[in-house]
Structure formats: C-alpha cells, structure tokens
C-alpha cells in the first residue's frame, strides 16, 4: 500500500483498478467506463478488468487499459483463481485501489486487495435480491466491505445501512451521471427523429408514450399496458401509441406474455414491443411522455434522468431512486407503484397540459438534470472518494 501523508504530494500518480463482469451495456458498465476515462484524463493510472465487450474500445481510446479475466464467473474455483490473477496484476501495475462494482468479481477483488496491499472500494449498484430466507445476504455482503462503499442514491445508502450494518462514516453517495453531449435536445437532428419514426411506423400527430427498459417483469410493462386500456376505456383516448423499448435478453416467454396481454385487451395497434434502440436521444424526442412503471424500487433510474435532460415529461413510480431524481409536479410526476389507473390519469394529464406550461416544465427538467446528474459530477465525486481513501489533498 502506498504511504502518503495529507501534507505531501504523491511521488507518482495513483493507480486505480476497476473490476466488473463485462463491458457490454448497462449502467454499471457505463459508470466504470466514464470513471476509467476520467482517471486517464486526470493522469492517474486507469485499469479495468472484465470479460470484455464493445465498450472496451471506448475505454482504451481514452488511454485507460483493459485486461480480460473471467471475472463474471460464479464458480468458486474460477473466483479463487481470479483472486490470484488480480493480486498479481495489482502488484505488477502498482495499484493503489481496487474498485469492485459487482458481487462475484468483488469476492475475488477483496481477496486480491489484501494480498497485494491495496485499498478496497466498492460501488453498491442495487438492492440485490436476498433470496429465500435471506440466504444470499452473505454473498451480497461483499459489496459492503469496502473501506468506502459508494451508493448510487440515498435510497441505496439507507438500504446498505439497514441490511448490511455499514456505518454512515463509510458510505458515500455518488449519483449516476449522464453525458449531456449525448442527451441534449439541441444535438438531435430532425433527420434522426424522422428516421426512427419511419422505422417504427408511427403515424403523425398521435401521442407517443414510451417505456424504455429491458423486458423484465419488475420494470412494470404490464402495468403500463393496463394503463393504456384505462386511457382508452375510461379516459376516452381513441388513438395513441405505446412503445415498450428494450431487449428481452432471452426472456422470450415474458415477451410473449406481454404480447398476449396486448391482444387480450385489444391493444394490438396501440402497444408495440421494440427491441433495443440504438438512438435513445431521438427516441426520447419522439415521445410525448416517458414512463418508468417499475414495481420494485429503482436503485437510481437512469432513464428518468435522461428523459428530463431531453425535456420530456416523466411519469415514474413513487419509490426508490425516482423520489430523488424527480421533483414531483415540477420536473415530472410520481404515481403509486403498480396502480394502472393512477398511471393512466397522470399520462392523460400530461398529454392535456397547455403548451406554455409544458415548455416551462421541460426547461425545469433540463435544468434539474444538468445541475445534479452530470457525468462530470459523478466522475469528480468518485475521484474525491479515491483521494479520501488515499489521504491525498484534493488538488493531488
């Protein structure tokens, strides 16, 4: 472990080794890549270990280094071997911190940090299922063993404290951040919007309600489908489109269940299940309302912030991270989780909003997102945690 006093400058720049299962897609991966790039740009040593993926190229273009190891494996023998390899790598690159972002890799990373004499930091990205009779509590608990445990929201910070007994002095809240060069209404050309609208065969002048998110039950797609039926049958909306945008990730049975629900309710022409979208900013701009209908609390809720950054009205479930990312009645609307009637009413209220008020709410949403959830702020605050662990001056 590198010895450095708070009154002296380091003899070399610190080295941080992040560990996570893969670099394919998702919030965990996005955060690791953003921080990895920020470390490289700050002149620190920046290494990431994963099984690889398409995001590796972006990381390496910025000057960070990637090492492939089978750290996604939950096989105890593979995890033990990973611990040995990570310890060897940490010694080779003179790592000061090993930062684990997922449970299976964290078990190897914690062991490696002890062997190599590194500091150990974790990021708690979710509530993690405790399983029947809380049998997974021990497996999950490795994420609470960091010298500092980064929580992606105050909701997660409270969860860590309540279920894993982590003292508040070790917890640091660092909300996820988004890239405002990407999620900026001014940066989305009309051509991109037209191209997507044509691909999805959206008729002109019809309200579009979108729920982005992978196809998994807790994301609440069935609740939104029920809300569409409520809007038609109770609130009198004759024509609208509802887009469920996200990959089924192999959950074909659930996808078929959603389609069956759509047919049963006579919503074949209204609800469309769409695979992953490569141009989410344009998709947001196509939408009149963006919905997060999660029945379980979101740890943070990235789409809620992205939609606000694009100036889109957001209707979200009133729990978890959404309570921190939405200012109810100003930058979005919060409804009781699982209540399709309340969801339908809020969506209808948004669609009927007077144009001037809609524009005002859009401006408030954009300002709120930019002030609180930028990628730069997330990276700066993560590096501050690293400096704290290393006992460095803020300017170091």
Image: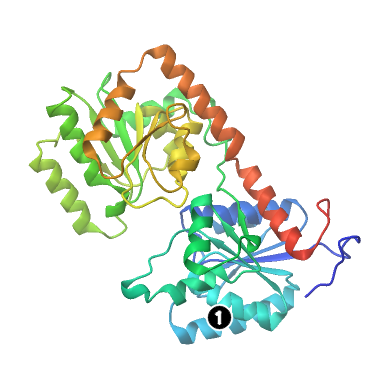
> Is residue 160 found left or right of 219 in the rendered image?
right
> Is residue 99 found left or right of 300 in the rendered image?
right
| Residue 108 spot, x, y in % from top left | 56, 78
| Residue 226 spot, x, y in % from top left | 18, 39
Q: Residue at x 33, y 47 (%)?
A: 294
Q: Residue at x 55, y 80 (%)?
A: 82
Q: Is residue 356 above or below residue 50?
A: above
Q: Quadrant of the C terminus?
A: bottom right
The answer to whether residue 270 is visible is: no
The answer to whether residue 186 is visible is: yes
Q: Is residue 340 above or below residue 99?
A: above
Q: Quadrant of the N terminus?
A: bottom right
| Residue 170 spot, x, y in % from top left | 64, 63
Q: How many marks?
A: 1
Residue 97: quarter of image: bottom right
Q: Is residue 266 above or below residue 29?
A: above
Q: 171 or 106: nearer the eye?
A: 171
Residue underneath mark 1 = 82
Q: Is residue 3 above or below residue 375?
A: below
Q: 124 or 339: nearer the eye?
A: 339
Residue 356: quarter of image: top left
Q: Residue furthest bottom?
A: 77
How would you rate the neighbour count of disc 1 (Cα within 10 Å): few for under 14, some for 14-19, many for 20 or more? Answer: many
Secondary structure at badge 1 equals helix
> Is residue 315 found left or right of 255 in the rendered image?
right
Q: Residue at x 69, y 75 (%)?
A: 90
């Amino acid at each position: 472990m590198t010895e450095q006093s708070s009154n002296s400058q380091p003899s070399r720049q610190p080295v941080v080794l992040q560990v996570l299962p893969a670099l394919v897609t998702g919030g965990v991966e996005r955060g690791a890549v953003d921080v990895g790039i920020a470390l490289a740009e700050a002149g620190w040593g920046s290494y990431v270990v994963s099984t690889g993926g398409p995001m590796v190229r972006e990381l390496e273009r910025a000057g960070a280094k990637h090492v492939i190891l089978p750290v996604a494996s939950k096989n105890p023998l593979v995890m033990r071997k990973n611990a040995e390899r990570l310890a060897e790598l940490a010694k080779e690159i003179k790592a000061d911190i090993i930062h684990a972002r997922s449970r299976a890799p964290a078990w190897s990373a914690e062991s490696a940090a002890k062997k190599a004499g590194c500091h150990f930091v974790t990021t708690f990205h979710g509530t993690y299922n405790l399983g029947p009779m809380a049998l997974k509590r021990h497996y999950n608990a490795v994420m609470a063993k960091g010298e500092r445990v980064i929580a992606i929201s105050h909701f997660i910070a409270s969860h860590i404290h309540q279920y894993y007994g982590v003292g508040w002095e070790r917890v640091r809240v660092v909300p996820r951040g988004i890239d405002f060069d990407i999620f900026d209404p001014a940066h989305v050309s009309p051509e991109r919007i037209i191209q997507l609208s044509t691909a999805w065969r959206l008729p002109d002048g019809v309200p579009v309600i979108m729920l982005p998110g992978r196809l998994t039950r807790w994301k609440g797609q069935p609740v939104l489908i029920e809300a569409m039926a409520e809007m038609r049958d109770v609130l009198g909306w004759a024509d609208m489109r509802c887009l469920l945008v996200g990959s089924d990730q192999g959950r074909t049975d659930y996808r078929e269940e959603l389609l069956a629900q759509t047919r049963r309710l006579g919503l074949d022409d209204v609800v469309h299940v769409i695979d992953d979208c490569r141009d989410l900013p344009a998709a947001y701009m196509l939408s009149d309302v963006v919905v997060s209908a999660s029945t379980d609390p979101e740890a943070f809720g990235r789409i809620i912030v992205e939609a606000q950054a694009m100036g889109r009205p957001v209707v979200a479930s009133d729990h978890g991270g959404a309570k921190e990312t939405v200012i109810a009645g100003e930058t979005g609307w919060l409804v009781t989780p699982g209540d399709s009637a309340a969801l339908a009413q809020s969506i209808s209220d948004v669609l009927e909003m007077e144009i001037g008020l809609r524009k005002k709410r859009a401006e408030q949403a954009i300002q709120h997102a930019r002030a609180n959830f930028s990628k730069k702020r997330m990276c700066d605050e993560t590096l501050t945690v690293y400096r704290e662990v290393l006992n460095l001056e803020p300017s170091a």
